Amino acid sequence: MLRLYNTLTRREEPFAPLRDNTVRMYACGPTVYARAHIGNFRTFVCVDVLRRTLKYLCGHAMHEAVNYTDVEDKTIAGALKAGQSLREFTDPWIAAFREDSAQLGIEAPEETPRATDLDNLTAMGELVLALEKNGHTYRRDGSVYFRIASLPDYGKLARLDHAGMKDGARVDVDEYGKDDPRDFVLWKASKPGEPSWDAGAGPGRPGWHLECSAMALRLFGGPLDIHAGGIDLIFPHHENEIAQSEGATKQPFARVWVHVEHLFVENEKMSKSLGNDFRVADIIARGHRASALRYLLLSSHYRKQLNFTWAGMDQAEESLRRIVDCLARLEDVSGGTGGRGINGRGGGPSSPPGPPEPPPSGVGGPSTARGATIGASIDTAQRMFREALECDLNTAAALAAVFDLVRDVNAAIDAKQIDRDEADAVRAAMSGFDQVLGVVSLRRAEDARPPVPVDEIERLIEERKTARQQRDFAAADRIRHELADRGILLEDNAGGTRWKRK
RNA sequence: GGCGCCGUCGCCAAGUGGUAAGGCAGAGGUCUGCAAAACCUCCAUCCCCGGUUCAAAUCCGGGCGGCGCCUCCA
């Protein structure tokens, strides 16, 4: 059973959805005023792994929402500056986010609500009115505020001791004035030139916590199973979401809170002023692949700070290559794709969605070089893989299980101690692993678009084959070097020559 | 000032009481037209000091070092 660390209780807890095997999960999405950076994507990749674990490893149905925050100070300022409407300004950033998400192999959530959608604004208005009715609000100069003192539970997520706050730790003093500095605005009176809606609470616009509560409650109704986001959102964003939601509905908002630690870049916090707030496009421009970035993001635990470095990208690239190369060797054993590209056809996930099936029984067969059978190696790897992920998504340990299998399989292939059925069984297991990790399939999608057309690669391989048969090694090497310069590597094996992207 | 986290091989990174996973890099060997890929072998006693225990990287205390939140931020 999956165990997740719950920020609310500060403990690891067994997880099961509350109702009908469907996980209701909400993750705070991007504010769409600029292109999301790799730190943002660390969170979204980790949330994606959580989603895939719940779906493929645990066999739950998913109902997940990741929102787009398209109305708050930065989007409004950006739109004003660009002389565009809010929608005109935010549309391209949403498109960019979707593009980068796809590049990183993030599965599309079932719901991607947008704060300014009419349904959502309506829900926000209703939420404010409900809070008003329950005595949690007060109005001042056209704005509606949440009164923290009205909710004894306030602060249970962040556990901040306000009595001991440092003088220097500023408490926001809003220009409208509040009864308590910690009170926050629910519905903000718009200034001239700012977008304004009247959703029931008077003309204005939502405060920056309201949307998430409103959208989550609208989409999921009752208590969410999981609410996720970056660690910086614990306070005040998530704390205030709880206040709004529970103040209005008088029932628990979310059962489990999952927070992803921050990404650092070369030992420094990311910031625009340092110029280290890299985007996915920057990684690609440096000659790296999105699949390697995803791998890097999975190589450490989501609750630990991860230090992004270019050396780390290189290492991730090589590590991932080891897995992919092993799969290519297996395809040779399986037959049908031998001599083709590593990205060959015929790969495809062979496990159906749902919890991975137990390893094929009776796959016993001959021993590997290490004395274990392939069937036993698969069995062990699947067990270790599952145990690792069930332990609060220990992706680093899960990867180790994959590499253990890779080593056993490579040894068996060298010793010619693996038959077609066993190779197929390994490939099925690997494809089950990748349903959760999502990194091999991503690499293959990249390889399907090599820098040199596949037809040309295959023609050159044929040419080189002829040259080699005539022992014209100079010509053969020339072809390989030329392809290498264009980003394609050739490898000669017993079964022929195969190519892969650099 | 309050709350909290972290310090494991050159690099990345698991392991939270039972005697140090995995990856990258490196050294030697096998295979090989070459080049790769692959395999085999080698490569750490866990920041320091004290304590608890039959047993500690893992628990407790004290240092040293790094970081986060308390303010917009994934």
Image (cartoon, coloured by chain):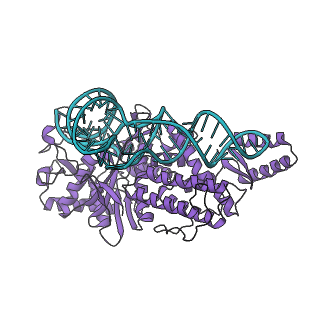
Chain colours: A purple, B cyan
How far across and down, in percent of the image, does residue A167 sit? 16, 32
Q: Is residue A194 left or right of residue A331?
A: left
Evaluate whether residue A34 shows in this view: no
Q: Residue at x 27, y 62 (%)?
A: A123
- Tell me the quarter of the image containing the N terminus of chain A: bottom left
How far across and down, in percent of the image, does residue B21 sit? 47, 48
Q: Is residue B29 left or right of residue A44?
A: right
Evaluate whether residue A57 shows in this view: yes
- Tell me the quarter of the image containing the C terminus of chain A: top right
Could you say which is closer to the camera, residue A123 or residue A360? Answer: A360
Q: Residue at x 34, y 59 (%)?
A: A3
Q: Is residue A397 above or below residue A420?
A: above
Residue at the bottom extreme, as displayed: A20
How far across and down, in percent of the image, does residue A498 sit? 71, 52
Could you say which is closer to the camera, residue A488 or residue A493? Answer: A493
Q: Residue at x 86, y 43 (%)?
A: A472
Residue A152 picture quarter: bottom left
**Marker count (numbered):** 0
Q: Residue at x 49, y 49 (%)?
A: A100
Residue A126 picture quarter: bottom left
Q: Is residue A18 left or right of residue A37?
A: left
How far across and down, in percent of the image, does residue A200 sit? 22, 60
